[in-house]
Image (cartoon, helix red, strand yellow):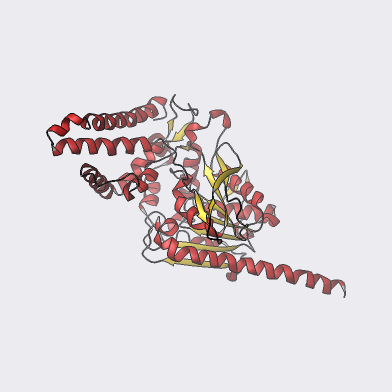
């Protein structure tokens, strides 16, 4: 599996399906067929249209597509994504809003690096922007990163988060969604020991695998069924000649997508059947719900082999975060060192990716943190996507997270006011 030919074969199959879809759409759209209307011709054109779009999206990075937000003055304010820190494997992007008074809340949103682009959390970004200054981790597609850029594993990922948090400073509220939750927790612990003044004000962990063994899912079961050698043989390929990362060992996004689709194959099959039928009847549109969802869902990115394998081995198989035995650059990371960063855990009762209990395990690891700085919320009826991007997030979870942030921002402000008075009293003794 580690040959370029395997990677290029997958890309060839994708490209062929895109070409077949485009050919079918073009052929069945000739005006001459209108002289003898035939439902089958309409179905062929619809199939081609949907197929071409679907396979084209698999190698296209989606745009953020956030043009403006409404300010307190009732006016639309333009949103300008700007790279503040550029790194080979990922950037820190700020969503700058010119001419709007700066918001008190400063939020770092740690987007997942699990096969999709950071734009997967677009709706989360959209919901946070009106009420906060926002930064997002924007991870790069490994196929586009030259081999000369070196490796990128879970330790490098954690160090990136440490650097981003240091850059933003101690008044930052960090939100980690899914995959980065355990590494964001580790990054905060590293700051607690190495740079206490740079720690974030709050840390919100949403549906992340802190302790994968706390509640079994298909994801954790798969990790237990295969050995690391089997996984490396089955999943790792070398980037082909088409991309700048030629020769780099990766876990291909197309392979990850196949796994995503297989988990709910019946539902996806029905969704595409309904879409083709609607297109044949002329009842679809460019921005309908199907296209909005699948334009994002089908857009996948490659992960470096070392990041994928080290995540499976160290987070899922060995449970290093769950056992508080995680190391970065040979130095042990002690989560118990976190003593004054308020931590909130959010889970969904119907989460089939990171089941309830996996993320909650973080609170037990925070042995140095007072209970007053710990919080948890279980959203009834919410699945994995819903707890950070669906109606459950917008209507219930987002207000709770904002309230959590504001409560501890006020706590810090009160402590800062009280501290000079204490120092002055001590000096007069």
Quadrant in the picture for the N terminus: top left
The answer to whether any part of residue 117 appears in the image is yes
Where in the figure is residue 111, as x and y percent of width and height? 50, 49
Quarter occupied by residue 281: top left
Where in the figure is residue 76, as x and y percent of width and height? 52, 54
Where in the figure is residue 213, as x and y percent of width and height? 43, 56
Quarter occupied by residue 338: bottom right
The foreground one among 143 and 194 is 143
Q: Give the mark count.
A: 0
Farthest right residue in view = 428
The answer to whether any part of residue 155 appears in the image is no
Q: What residue do we see at 49% from left, 66% from top? A: 399
Left or right: residue 24 versus residue 388 is left
Quadrant in the picture for the C terminus: bottom right
The foreground one among 68 and 325 is 68
The foreground one among 61 and 149 is 61
Q: What residue do we see at 56% from left, 63% from top? A: 343
Q: Is residue 341 above or below residue 424?
A: above
Where in the figure is residue 305, as x and y percent of width and height? 47, 36
Q: Is residue 325 above or below residue 258?
A: below
Q: Is residue 250 above or below residue 175?
A: above
Q: What residue do we see at 48% from left, 50% from top? A: 179
């Amino acid at each position: 599996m580690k040959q370029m030919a395997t990677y290029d074969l997958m890309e060839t199959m994708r490209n062929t399906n895109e070409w077949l879809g485009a050919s079918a759409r073009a052929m069945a759209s000739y005006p001459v067929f209108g002289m003898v209307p035939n439902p089958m011709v309409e179905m062929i054109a619809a199939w081609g249209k949907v197929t071409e779009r679907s396979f084209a999206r698999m190698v296209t990075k989606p745009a953020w597509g956030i043009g403006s937000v409404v300010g307190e003055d009732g006016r639309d304010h333009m949103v300008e994504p700007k790279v503040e820190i550029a790194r080979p494997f990922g950037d820190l992007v700020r969503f700058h809003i010119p001419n709007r008074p700066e918001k008190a809340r400063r939020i770092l949103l740690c987007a997942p690096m699990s096969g999709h682009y950071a734009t997967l959390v677009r709706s989360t970004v959209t919901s946070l922007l009106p009420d906060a200054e926002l930064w997002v981790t924007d991870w790069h597609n490994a196929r586009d990163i030259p081999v000369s850029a070196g490796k990128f594993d879970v330790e490098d990922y954690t160090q990136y988060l440490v650097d981003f948090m240091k850059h933003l400073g101690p008044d930052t509220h960090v939100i980690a969604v899914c995959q980065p939750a355990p590494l964001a927790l580790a990054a905060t612990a590293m700051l607690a020991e190495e740079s206490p003044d740079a720690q974030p004000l709050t840390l919100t962990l949403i549906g992340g695998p802190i302790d994968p063994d706390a509640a079994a899912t298909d994801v954790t079961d798969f990790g237990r069924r295969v050995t690391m050698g089997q996984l490396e043989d089955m999943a790792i390929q070398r980037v082909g000649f088409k991309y700048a990362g030629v020769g780099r060992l990766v876990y291909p996004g197309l392979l990850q997508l196949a796994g995503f689709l297989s988990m709910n194959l019946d539902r996806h099959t029905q969704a595409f059947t309904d879409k083709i039928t609607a297109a044949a009847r002329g009842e679809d549109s460019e921005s309908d719900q199907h296209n909005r969802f699948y334009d994002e869902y089908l857009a996948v990115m490659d992960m470096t082999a070392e990041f994928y394998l080290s995540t499976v081995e160290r987070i899922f198989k060995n449970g290093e975060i769950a056992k508080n035995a995680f190391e970065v650059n040979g130095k042990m990371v002690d989560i118990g060192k976190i003593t004054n960063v308020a931590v909130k855990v959010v889970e969904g009762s119907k989460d089939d990716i990171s089941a309830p209990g996996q993320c909650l395990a973080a609170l037990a690891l925070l042995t140095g943190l007072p209970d007053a700085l710990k919080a948890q919320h279980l959203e009834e009826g919410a699945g994995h996507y819903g707890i950070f991007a669906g109606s459950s997030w917008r209507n219930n979870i987002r207000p709770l997270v904002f309230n959590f942030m504001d409560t501890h921002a006020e706590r810090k402000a009160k402590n800062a006011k009280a501290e000079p008075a204490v120092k002055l009293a001590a000096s007069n003794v």
